[in-house]
Amino acid sequence: MLVVSDDRPDLRSTPDVEASDARTRGAPVTILRIYAVLLVLIPPTHIIEPLGAVGTPATVVALAALMLWAVGVLAPGTYLCRTVVPVRVVMGVLIVATFVSYAIAHVHYVPAVELLASDRALIQLFAWSGVALLAAEGLRDREELYRVLRVFVAAVAAMALIGVFQFRFGIDFAENVNRIPGLHQNADLVSIQDRAGFRRPAGTATHPIEFGCVIAMTLPLALHLARFDLARSAFRRWFTVAAILMGIPVAVSRSAVLAALVAAIVIFIGLVILIAGFFVTPPQGLVMIAVGLGLGSLAGLELSIREHFAAYRSHTLLLSAAVGVPVFGVLWAATRISPAICAAAGLLAFGGAAWLFASAFRRRSGGALYRLRS
């Protein structure tokens, strides 16, 4: 047995540990928790007026997260805990692809409305990148991850309860957002709609379908915390699950109910196949892993296809990736072609699919290259 001794002085008395304790005041976990609350509970219709339509509080915090991540990379210290190359590569590829699309869109005349929308999309992309990178490289351990998930699930549970009050009593707590100093209402927020005589609550979202889908997608996280986050009492763990379960039917939306049911079934089947794939020898094991990953992303891909070809919202990059990534995976796993050639083939398939999907969306939307929101 090899024993490595540590002759360093007691770490509890060193300035580094004091700095590490001070780190918690502006730690990534704190930034991400604030972002989760603002993202869920502040409607995107409310902005910081001088910043324009992109200036939602959540976006501002996300851009701050990107800045803190960049400082942590460039400056020596312990702010970031690790370097996660895959996340950097994925976000880098997404940013490059978006910039290429942005550049192609500006080859010809672009209406002012679409120009502003594309600028907002770039800013939001950087904001998402900041959250992804700070979460991947800034969270120290599972406990910090749980702290972020607790706040996010609690915020969604609060959103669900707001929807319950809107549905049952017609009381709209979302209107209280107007009382927050510094926020300006950039668009009308209709939190309670009507469908066949039933109130359709939107909670703090912009539409009842969005409300229902958000809380349905959060249900698996709430169930995970209720089962495994034993640091909290059973009441606190299962109360959020109960609140989210109450919110799903009051959305009066098929999307919410189907999202919860289909997501549970598909994810369960996908996980079973995915886990089994690790215990089966190649190539059958690789096929099972690919099938498991495919099932895990099937529901979201189906919605993206319908929205794209209905010209409701463009998903060119996502659908193109759904073509390019399998091409790379199949070539890499089933042939002896070098990884560089496999990657080139995947990029070629991605580019060709992007051109076809963009052309299809342009035809169906009456000339628009993309649309972020209907």
Image (cartoon, rainbow, N blue to C red):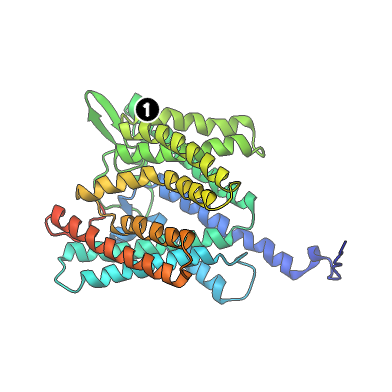
Q: Quadrant of the N terminus?
A: bottom right
Q: Quadrant of residue 251?
A: top left
Indicate whether 227 appears above or below 321.
above
* Residue plotted at (86% across, 70% down): 7
Image location of residue 103, percent across then percent down: 26, 73
Residue nearest the viewer, comparing 174 with 367: 367
Q: Is residue 61 visible?
A: no
Query: Does residue 91 lie above or below 218 as drawn?
Result: below
Total residue callouts: 1
Residue 237, percent from left and from top: 58, 34
| Residue at point 79%, 63% (across, down) | 12
Helix, strand or loop status at disc 1: helix
Q: Quadrant of residue 108?
A: bottom left
Which residue reaches farthest left? Answer: 366
Q: Is residue 61 above or below residue 8?
A: above
Kind of residue at disc 1 = Pro
Q: Is residue 317 left or right of residue 68?
A: left
Residue visible at 25% across and 47% down? 307
Residue denoted by label 1: 249
The answer to which quarter of the image holds residue 136 is bottom right
Q: Is residue 350 above or below residue 284?
A: below
Please indicate whether residue 218 sits to the left or right of residue 250 in the image. Answer: right
Q: Residue 43 location, x and y as percent? A: 35, 47
Bin the neighbour count of mark 1 within 10 Å (Cα to Cα): few under 14, some 14-19, many 20 and up: some
Look at the image and tell me whether residue 362 can be seen: yes
Percent x, y of residue 305? 28, 48
Front residue of this view, candidates 23 and 258: 258
Residue located at (42% from left, 71% from top): 341
